[in-house]
Image (cartoon, grey):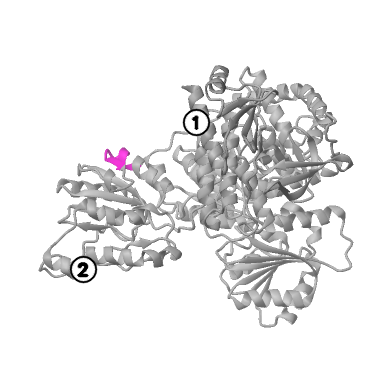
Amino acid sequence: VQLVLPEPELLEQQHSQWKEKEQALFSASLASQNLIPEPERLFQDLALAFESKIWSQKWEVHELALGEEEPRSHRLRLQSRAKTADVENLVKKLQNLQETGTRTVIVANSQSQLDRLLFLLGQNKMRAVVAKDEKDLPKDPSIVALALGTISESFHLPEAKIAFFSEDEIFGEKRHGASPRKRTNTPQVAPEDLSVGDLIVHGEHGIGRYMGLARVHALESEVDFALVEYAEGDKLYVPIYRLESLSRYVGAAGTSAATLDKLGSGSFQRTKEKVKSAIKDIAQDLLKVQAERASRPGHAFSDPDDEYRRFEAEFPFDETPDQEKAIQDTLEDMCTARAMDRLICGDVGFGKTEVAIRAAFKAAQDGKQVAVLVPTTILAEQHYLTFAQRMATLPVKIASISRFKSKKEQAAVLADLEAGKLDIVIGTHRLLSKDVRFKDLGLLVIDEEQRFGVEHKEKLKQLKATTDVLTLTATPIPRTLQMSLMGLKDVSIIRTPPGDRLTIKTHLAIFAEDLIQTAIRTELGRGGQVFFVHNRVQTIGKIAELLQKIVPEAKTVVAHGQMAEGQLERAMIGFYQKQYDVLIATAIIENGLDVPNANTLIVNRADTFGLSQLYQIRGRVGRSQARAFAYLLVPETAIITDEARERLSVLQRFVDLGSGYAIATHDLELRGGGDILGQAQSGHIASVGYEMYLEMLQDEIHLLKGEAVAKPLDDVEINVSFSALLPQDYVPDMKTRLLLYRRLSAIATEEQAEDARKELEDRYGPLPREASELLFVLRLKMLMRRMGLRSLTLGPKGISLSPGKDPILDPLLILSLVHNRPTEYAILPEGKFVIKGHFQSCTQIYDRLRQLLQNSTQ
């Protein structure tokens, strides 16, 4: 049996323990005495492996030798390593084993695969339950147990009457990365997007400028605050437990139009009232548009069935949580009678294509045709290969159409498309030509819509009128982004990166031959390849000559859109097959070229590219586990505009994985969103920022629909003499501390607080006292909101509590406590309730308040 161990740092600690288990299970002494462990004991021995989802090291396979007989293998062979979901063979094998009284366990690598197994077994009338440990292992052999974990291959212990099945041999081996971390709920503009100097919006005080974290020494403690500067130099110190009240300001047409509010003037509240008054009309218009969308007829696709579940189980990677949610949202849209119009936003390599593949397969299952529209011939060919590979064993006919195809080949594809012989066609804007006719188009997939011109988009509007539409993008264009923010287009954001993916190191530099030489030779030295982007066809030949001169050992090839089809295709394929070391290309590589071995990018005249375009080009590297580098070069004598400088600055700042949506919001600031429902609204958006505008808009829509509007959470004030923060030696990077503070401040449940504690310990080690106190401050905030308290202050004689608008503490109980136990409780003249005592930690304060709440509610 091949056992799989957890992370390497745990290996040394558990080695002796596992070695004993191995010997107990597989030693010659056991074999000679014919001693077979009980099924519960065996399951217990394997339980440690099932508990972890992160695997890094494997043990060798052992074949059991039982009794005096010759050693014999007890591996269960379903067939060779599965290429398709072999559910029928599995069911047959399970039934044969169950007839002999053998209990069966299937080990699934991920929760999604476990759910699919439950579905597929149920469809085949097999009873199954999930077994979290040996206690859950069913005694009845007719019930299949499903466990979460990893084993290398299936095996059977006949004398013990138990058999284990590997999910990989059923669905095919997956490529597993590190388990993605849990994400707390984040605003549209994520916390990691906030940097010193950014404009922010405070829900009560308005627009200010974020000036970073400030550590303040008060009494005997240290506290971190977010420092926000307002008009006339006024400063606001926001406690870290209330950082959820801050959001980065996103205006309608640039941050320069924003004016800082003045603290204490009440101007922002008056502005909010004006916006609220003006927003009623836009809410009514929006409801009309939504009603039109809802009434637009569409095809209701069938619910996912047995065949679909098998297909999705064959996906060779573990889905990330965001990717699973995007797939679920898309299927739900397709299975309703309303025509779908969904935007899938995610960085390159984050799994958008798989979302489209699942949707295309669902459409083909229902007999509908699918058109996949892409901006470049390179991307069309790459998507064709990807779709064809995923559906190789299925009766789905796929074809591509682009300028790489001859006229005869294109004519044949178009004839099959019109006759209904083609299920999925993938192509460039050629698909929008007049001679392209579908027999029954049911789904249109648009990859990177911003790459199509106005003429193409008019044709797209006609197709969208009667067809489900799925749009894929890494950086949505401002107009599309604004439509999604307004609610006119449904959006799913894939922010979770694949396991083991690293951020791209991005450098802005002056064009210099020695820098280019060093960058190329460094990449070649580690066996990689290089993209060199020069977006001028007229001078690209001179750049090629320069590179050949300074790095003569490198094999270079040139690629641009004006080359003949065959020549361009040979250059691209040659680079993909590692025949060349450096690809010197125009922005043609922006979409569609996936070369995991290329991990250095050099962009010449980076100041001439758009923000989204630069982000897309940078996404050509960093698609493997190797660290990638991007060099943005500008000439020393170039006059760079302020807007170009801002673009380059934004790209340098947003290097974290999953920053595409944040890039798009900055693009929205720089370029504006266009006229969606009237330019008059842009002034209102600029005065309060997008997030608050959208929040107010949603509230108004709920009111017009007669729905309840959630009340804003009351701010609470906590004054304690304990240091409650993340120490600098625990989390050294200030930006990371801010990110953690923002995430922690949004905690709303005890479960989230416990998850945060586990994540901090996992990333940084055991919690220091200050960090532990911080988590209890956050718990105090939740508890105070629940109790309707406005403030808590710790003094020398105890803690004093000030009630909020709707306190839930029973006044009679408080009076009774004060009257009967005056040494423990008191009421101050200003109405504060005091709990007397000497409290040495936030933990004690939290426990005392929780006890008071319990007494009040009994």
Per the image, the residue denoted by label 1 is 851
Which numbered dot is residue 636? none
Q: Name the residue under label 2.
A: 27
The total number of labels drawn is 2
Q: Residue furthest left?
A: 68
User: For the residue marked with disc 2, what is the amino acid?
Assistant: Ser
**How far across and how far down the image is residue 642, in percent?**
86, 54
Task: State how far apart marks 1 and 2 are (Cα).
Answer: 55 Å
Q: Is 150 placed above or below 255 here? A: below
* Circle 1 crowding by C-alpha within 10 Å: few under 14, some 14–19, many from 20: few
Identify which residue, 609 or 823, lies in the foreground: 823
Q: In this view, does 415 lie to the left or right of 21?
A: right
Quarter of the figure that contains the N terminus: bottom left
Q: Which of 363 and 45 is in front in this view?
A: 45
Residue for point 78% across, 61% down: 606
The answer to whether residue 360 of the structure is visible from this angle is no
Q: Which amino acid does label 1 sit on?
A: Gln
What residue range appears in magenta?
A: 120-129
- Residue located at (81% from left, 24% from top): 274
Percent coordinates x, y for residue 646 in the rendering? 81, 54
Judge whether residue 126 is colored magenta: yes
Q: What secondary structure is marked by label 1?
A: helix
Q: Can residue 118 be seen in this view?
A: yes
